[in-house]
Structures are given as structure tokens and as C-alpha cells.
Amino acid sequence: MKFVFYTHSLLSDWNHGNAHFLRGVMRELVNAGHDAVALEPADGWSRQNLISDQGQQAVDRFLKDFPGLESALYDEHFDHEAALDGADVVVVHEWTDPQLVKRLGDLRQNSDFTLIFHDTHHRAVSAEPEIAELSLKHYDMILAFGDTLRQRYLAQGWGSQVVTWHEAADLRLFRPMHTPAKDGDLIWIGNWGDDERTAELHEFLIEPARSLRLKTLVRGVRYPSEAKETLAAANITYGGWIANADVPEAFARYRVTVHVPRRPYRETLPGIPTIRMFEALACGIPLVSAPWEDTEGLFRGGQDFLFARDGQEMRKHLTNILSDPELSAELARNGYETITTRHSCAHRVDELLSVLSQHGTARVRTQLAPKEAAE
């Protein structure tokens, strides 16, 4: 089948975690014999910032790191009708311009492709009017990256066929790597952002690293000057943007990492971890998480990783992991096992195809119907 993904960006992962997941999903679809192409706006915020921050060569790396993936830029003159010719499944990300969201819905009325809206953000609660105004009436289904988000769509009447579809790790990229020596103790890869976890980063990352005198590296973007000064004062090295393709090796060079969820997810959309958590565990690095409620039982808390209820417990867990090789190895092994058995992009593609076989258009259901065994 032919899959077309409207995304904010496939080329750029600058402050754009959905690119991580989409790349993995597209690779699995292509590996399974399907066609997959991404369409992204030529003036996309993430791509523009990546070029401004790192230069065009950072975008060019995409072709080297992800051979076989195709992304085309569109502007106001782009022929969307031609781009969708022959498409079986069209997936539209929630950051897509509202007018284009509506236009694609209108196109669906006279077409037999399956049209899906994909939400991987917290705007359904933090910017509810923006989501409420989207024209989704002609969309066949909605994919929400957590059950609480799915329930929000249903409660607000934004869709009748809403399916939970969590993010996951691209195991073609994220895997344990062995390095001859470690560069330090603690690594955190994440973006500072819009003050959605500033207090949490102080309590669960900066202060533990400072008080325990851990050799710590932080990578990510959108760090204001005061954040960089705070890291420097805690003797934490700030390394700026890191290409997602370089993350597995970065994890391999440190002994432990932490997960610090954003406040909107913890408070209003429980059960949704960041994609970095899936990716870190896939790399076999021990992880300690700040509080969040795993309402869907995605992980085995206390086995796959350790929960820290406050900064003091974070310091305790980090100390134990760094001083106990057996605990460190057990956590790494358990976390990796859970990802590889439940939370890979291959698993998510299987889930997507299963949903399409039930709720896709007749043309898609026919293509996915089990073939009768030859006599």
C-alpha cells in the first residue's frame, strides 16, 4: 500500500520528537514492502531552526542517516491532489495548518483512501480551542498517543473512531552500543522548552547532579541564557543540539540517564511518557524517572527503571545505580527487554495495520484481508 504522511518535518528533529517516531514507522513500512512518503511545509519551524542553528549540512545528514526515506516540501502552490494520487492511507499530523487539515478532509469526500489524524502533543488540553476548531468530520479515524488523550477526543466529540497509538523506539537506530570507556556518569537528552518542566529539571536533574558531583552532560535545544548559566554553576556540561542518529552512541558513553516529563502530561494527560524514554531503554542505559503515572502499564516500574518521587529519592537511586554494577545491569536488561517485546516501531506498524484492517476504507480493508491459503 501507499502511505502518505503529512508531518511538521521528517528532515528535521530540532525540538521535534515526532520525527523520531515517524522515521521509524516509515522504515518499518518500507521494510514490509509498502511505499511511504512524507510531506512537510517548506517553512516548517523545526527545519528552519535546525538550519539556523546547525546549517544546511544538518538537514543533508538526513539522507545519510536514513537512506530510503522520502520527504517532499510543500508550499501554497503545491498540488496536494496530485501528491495523493494512488494513496491508500493518508496520515495528517496535528501540527498541520488548519486550512490544510480541512482541505484534506474535503478531498477525502471524493476519494477512497483512509484519512487519519495523528495527535502527539498536549494541545488538546493546553490549547483546547485550537484543536476544537480543526475540521475533522471527514477523517476516518484519529490516532492519539495515549489513552487519556483518546478519551479527551471522545469526550469533546472531536471524533467517533479514536485509537490509542503510543510512540515507540526505532530499533533500527536505537540499540545497546559498547564503548571502551565512559565519558561520564549522567546524561540527559531533552529540550528546555517553554517552562513546562523548569522546576522539575532543577529538582530531578540539576540539583542531584550538582550535589552528587556527577560528571554530567546535557544535550538539547531552546536553552535560555539563564538555563545555561544554571547548568554551568552546577558544573554540568551543555552540549547543544544532537542529531537523533547520534543519540545511541551518546547514551553508551554514560552510565545512567533520567526521564523528566513535561508538566502538562503529568498533570492532565497521565500515562504518556516522552519518546526519549522509549529510546533510552532501547539503548540499554539504566534510567531513573521523575514522577508520572503509568496508567496503561507500558512498563514494569521498579524493574525496567526506577521511579523517584522527589529530588532526595533521585539522588538515592542515582547513587545506588552508579555504585552497584549488578543493579545497573539488571535495569538495563529489563528495560531493553520491555522495549524489544512491546514498544518498537515494528510493533506500532503492526498495530496500525490491524486498526486499518478493521476501520480503514473498503479498499484498504480488502488489501489487508488475510489471503486464503492455496489448495
Image: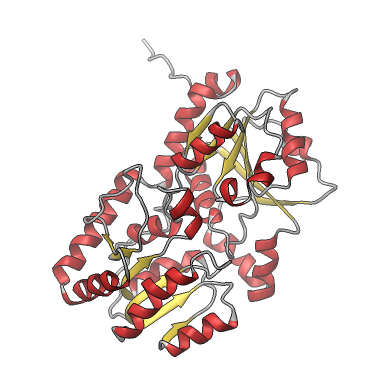
Q: Nearer the viewer, residue 121 or 2?
A: 121
Q: Is residue 57 above or below residue 157?
A: below
Q: Is residue 139 above or below residue 41?
A: above
Residue displayed at 35% across by 67% down: 258
Q: Give the number of callouts.
A: 0
Is residue 66 placed above or below 102 in the rendered structure?
A: below
- In the rendered image, residue 366, in percent from the top left (x then y), is placed at 54, 18
- For the N terminus, the image quarter is top right
| Residue 8, x across and y down, in percent | 65, 53
Q: Quadrant of residue 93?
A: top right
Percent position (x, y) of residue 276? 43, 60
Q: Residue furthest top?
A: 375
Side of 204 relative to 353 (left or right): left
Front in this rendered view, residue 202 or 216: 202
Establish if 157 lies above or below 126: above
Task: Judge left or right: residue 90 versus residue 149.
Answer: right
Looking at the image, which is closer to me, 341 or 227? 227
Residue 317, position as x, y percentages in the image: 23, 70
Q: Quadrant of the C terminus?
A: top left
Q: Quadrant of residue 48?
A: bottom right
Left or right: 279, with 102 as reference point: left
Name the residue located 40 percent from the left edge and 78 percent from the top edge.
206
**Residue occupying image coordinates x 28% and y 65%:** 286
